[in-house]
Image (cartoon, rainbow, N blue to C red):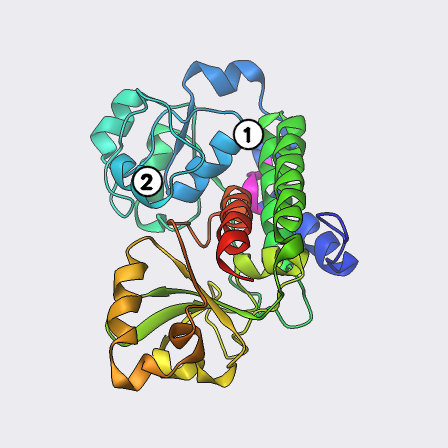
Amino acid sequence: MPGINGTVGRRRVLRTAALLPAILFPAGLMAGGAWSAERRTDGGLCALDWTSAQALLALGIVPRGLPELDRYRRAVVEPAVPDGVPDIGARAEPNLELLDRLAPARFVGDGTLSAVQSRLERIAPVTVHPPFDTRSDGDGEPGGQLAFAIASLRGLAAGLGVPEAAERAVARLDRTLAAARDRLSGWEPRPLYILSVLDGRRVLIHGHNSLYQGVLDRLGITNAWTGPSGPYGHATVTMDRLAGRPDAGLVNIGSEGGRALEALAALPLFAGLPFLREGRVTILPPILFYGGVPAAERFARLLGDGLAPHHG
């Protein structure tokens, strides 16, 4: 089994590495080299979104603040946020007055707050950390999103002056993948639908340009969904669209999905789906599907633990 970078096309990695510095760090910062430790710690680094918070925490940096902290702890979970970190408000509309009082040395965000970026920049510089390549369709690029996430985390760490922290995070991911492969050594391989139930008919299903695909590739598992998926690697489809692979298993991400699947299995329209009829269903806790390296690590660990005792 190849290592964490083993199945990724060399051209894609080089292209990603070439693009990331200009995205992550403005020209003035690149000219001056990595941020000094003094600059990083004086006012702290404030995460403007969950993926940026995950990245900072994965690098061992406690954010000066992050949005919707309670929801992060329920829906994202990992890396865990220490007590005492301020909640800066909604992801779509951070509390600018609070941010001004916190006076961080720098903001780190995914680039989705362009409407208020000029106001944020009056408080502190903004670094864009893209954890997900929305331009990728996944064709011919096995593990593409995972490779992009790794390169993005390495770029962020280099700009922060802590490149070794990214290598530790990637090594943790590698160890987690190896442990998951060991856990699955006795599991009978089968294609898997990776999804979250939305309501009584529809599911959010993850395709070949998803972050999860890179983990599946490294575990030697086939993604049962071969249909189209959007910029973030998922599509919304009705449950009957999953009848094409009768040998497949189903992995639902989100603990509440168990009750929803039980309700679906009771409906004549869906009761005949083999994975429901034969109980080939695994329920995993929440995972942020566009959350970069930390989310990939969480998915690999939970999938290995979840499949081993329930599938055979």
Tell me the number on the disc at residue 72.
2
Quadrant containing the N terminus in the rendered view? bottom right
On screen, residue 2 above or below 312: above
Image coords of residue 9 (percent x, y): 75, 60
Q: Look at the image and tell me whether residue 92 can be seen.
A: yes
Element class at badge 2: helix
Of the pair 280 and 289, the residue shown nearer to us: 280
- Predominant secondary structure, magenta span: helix
Element class at badge 1: loop
**Residue type (three-letter) at the residue carrying disc 1:** Leu
Image coords of residue 57 (percent x, y): 48, 30
- The residue under label 1 is 59
Of the pair 53 and 98, the residue shown nearer to us: 53
On screen, residue 195 above or below 73: below
Image coords of residue 72 (percent x, y): 32, 40
Q: Is residue 26 magenta?
A: yes
Would residue 194 be found to the left or right of residue 216 on screen? left
In this picture, which residue range is highlighted in magenta?
Answer: 23-27
For the residues labelled 1 and 2, say whether their Cβ atoms are less than 8 Å apart: no
> Which residue is pictured at 38% across the width and 49% down the height?
285
**Residue type (three-letter) at the residue carrying disc 2:** Tyr
